[in-house]
Structure formats: C-alpha cells, structure tokens
Image (cartoon, rainbow, N blue to C red):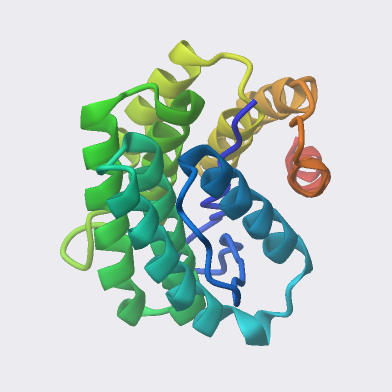
Amino acid sequence: TTEIYTLSLHTLFRSSVCISLMVYANLTFADNSSTMLNIQQQWASINYEANNSEKEKAFIALIVDAEAFVASSNNSAEALTWLAITQSSAAKAKGGLGALDFAKAARANLEKAIEADEQVLEGTALTVLAALYHNVPGWPVAFGSDKKAARLFEKALALYPNSMDTHYFYAEYLFDDGEYEEAARHLTLAKSAPEKQNRPIADKGRRAEIEILEAKVTNKL
C-alpha cells in the first residue's frame, strides 16, 4: 500500500503540522524503484523522528535528490509526485509567505504527475494536491480552494477507497470545515486500512496522527 508522505498538513500557513524529513546522504538513482523506497523510508524516519531544528536545510537538500530522481526516471509520475512532496516539506520548514514558492512548485509538479497518471502511487498525487488546495491561503495571497480540494479528495477515494492516508487527510479537511461526524467516519476507515508493508515507522506514525485527530473530533461531537 502506498502512503501519502507529503502533507501532514493541517494548515500550511496557519498552525499546521506538515511533513518533515531530513536527508543528509546523497541517493543513487540506478534503480528507480529502490530509489523511491529509499526516499520513502528516509521520509518516514525523519518525519516522525527528526528534530525541528534540522529540517529546513535537509528539505532543501532533499529537493536536489528528488530532482535527480525525476531526471533519472524520465519525468515519471512517481518521481514528480515525490519531488512535489519534498517541495511541500520545504514550504513547511520555511513557513510564512516565503513558503509560497515551494507550494506553487509542488502544485505544478503534482499537476504534471496527475496528467501523466491520475492513479499514480494509489492516488497519492491527487490527495497531496487536495491537501495543498485546502491548506494554502486563497486568492489574492495564493491558490487555496476548498472546492477544488473536495473534488480531488473525492476522486482519490473513488479510485482507492481503502487508502489510509486519503481518509486521514480528508478527515482533516472535514474537521477544519466543522463536519465532525463525517470526519469521524473517515478516521474509522483510515484505522481499518491495511498496514503499510515495508514501512513500519510510517505506519506507526500515521496511526498515531489518526488517534490525535480522532481525539479532537471526539471533543467536538
């Protein structure tokens, strides 16, 4: 099962909890599938274990690695999605309006990935783009749009109804919009999703995030 690593966004420019990762070692790109797994595992380790003070520099370094992954894979949808993930990470690390350039770059790469393969990484690109639209400011500051976010979440769930990550991020969206009963329903579906094979740190971390959001939802019901 593929997970959405990129946006543990609650609100990207408000009191958000975004993705975080740190990569100091350069990756090799001879084998694209092993490269992607390496990036995924690096992400999980840093997202849930790294200190905040270490993240900004590491995010920017990871963008370089992700760009190399894109080049080595001939602009594959998978690599473009991971480049967008790293750019979203850099946006959170930088914070404020200065993060908008990273967010815009992430959106552009997600759109390219979706154009190439709408179902890439089991709907990951759709879900990440939905979270971006929900969490960045709207016009005239940025491109945020809850209407676009809702359409993307619904499309991702139609394609992959058992995705833990899509249910989780959609539940965040619903919670922010005050739809607490629906948020609770999607969190229940997220908890019942299969474990993420070969990625125990990410699975454990996501399930912990689900529990935290579930407690917030319960307090509103």
Residue pictured at 59% horizontal, 31% vertical: 2
Residue 196 in sight in this render: yes
**87 in relation to 160, above or below:** below
Q: Tell me the quadrant of the picture where the C terminus can be found.
A: top right
Residue pictured at 23% horizontal, 29% vertical: 116
Pinpoint residue 35: horizontal percent, then vertical percent. 53, 49
Pinpoint residue 201: horizontal percent, then vertical percent. 80, 49
Residue nearest the viewer, comparing 208 with 14: 208
Residue pictured at 77% horizontal, 21% vertical: 194
Residue nearest the viewer, comparing 28 with 111: 28
Q: Is residue 153 left or right of residue 47?
A: left
Residue pictured at 49% horizontal, 18% vertical: 157
Q: Tell me the quadrant of the picture where the N terminus can be found.
A: top right
Q: Is residue 117 left or right of residue 36?
A: left
**128 in relation to 66, above or below:** above
Residue 136 in sight in this render: no
Q: Is residue 91 left or right of residue 9?
A: left
Pinpoint residue 172: horizontal percent, then vertical percent. 59, 42
Q: Is residue 215 left or right of residue 32?
A: right
**57 in relation to 44, above or below:** below
Pinpoint residue 104: horizontal percent, then vertical percent. 25, 60
Residue nearest the viewer, comparing 50 with 92: 50
